[in-house]
Amino acid sequence: MENKINKAKEVVLNGGVILYPTDTIWGIGCSAIIESAIKKILKIKRRNNNKLLICLVSSIEMLKRYVKNVPEYVLKYLDDDSPTTIVYPKVTGMNQVLYGKNESIAIRLVKDNFCKELINQINAPLISTSANISGKPFPKKFQEIDKKIINEVDYVVNFDDSNLKNPKPSRIIKVLLNGQIEIIRE
């Protein structure tokens, strides 16, 4: 695993895009700081920037670098076994291309060991978006990934994807400015 992390780290730090298994499904990723890499992901997915990309963080400490006020009630979702992406308002420190309304960004505290270690190595959030062309079904297995995507990324992290127990996208919860939450995807 160390060789795969080192290669992925090199690609990501140099502004490249990787194809990798996450704690949910196969994803396309890059640094959440490097604008050219983020734009490359949008191009690979044939998608405009009207929908938030998810950023993965490795720890609550890293989350708090970007989200100054993590509501206490959100912590229960972060400890849950179900991968949960939370859309936070007023996020700072990431590339402007990622921001939605109210400077919001979708962030997930990742549980997968490969992802955690890679994020720790690059010392920045990692973009994670499903490895599909926008509007197409997300792939549950590597063999289902469109060859166009495989050919357009800079590095494919070869892993046995049988450890993806129940491959499906994460649940998404939005923290509203008034402190309430809204369930976007269960």
Image (cartoon, rainbow, N blue to C red):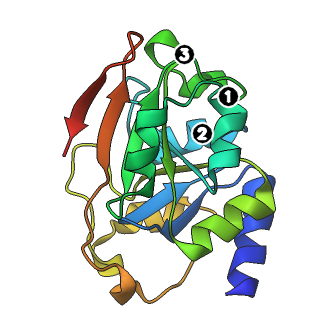
> Can I make out residue 31 in this image?
no
Residue at left offset 67%, top offset 28%: 95
Q: Is residue 99 above or below residue 73?
A: above
Q: Is 59 left, or right, of 110 in this rendering?
A: right
Res 134 quadrant in image: top left
> Can I make out residue 10 in this image?
yes
Is the residue under label 2 in contact with that under label 1 (CB below 8 Å)? yes
Label 2 SS: helix
Q: Is residue 5 above or below residue 105?
A: below
Check residue 38 in the rendering and tell me which mark sits there, or answer none: 2
Residue at left offset 60%, top offset 23%: 91
- On the image, numbered disc 3 is attached to which residue? 103
User: Amino acid type of disc 2?
Assistant: Ile
Mark before the other along the chain sequence, 2 or 3: 2
Mark before the other along the chain sequence, 3 or 1: 1
- On the image, numbered disc 1 is attached to which residue? 95
Q: Nearer the viewer, mark 3 or mark 1?
A: 3
Residue 123 in the image: state x and y as whole percent. Answer: 79, 53
Separation of marks 1 and 2 at Cα, in angstroms: 9 Å
Separation of marks 3 and 1 at Cα, in angstroms: 11 Å
Q: Nearer the viewer, mark 2 or mark 3?
A: 3
User: Quick one: label 1, few (<14), some, or many (20+) residues within 10 Å?
Assistant: few
Residue 104 in the image: state x and y as whole percent. Answer: 49, 21
User: Quick one: label 2, few (<14), some, or many (20+) residues within 10 Å?
Assistant: many
Residue at the extreme front = 72
Q: How many marks?
A: 3
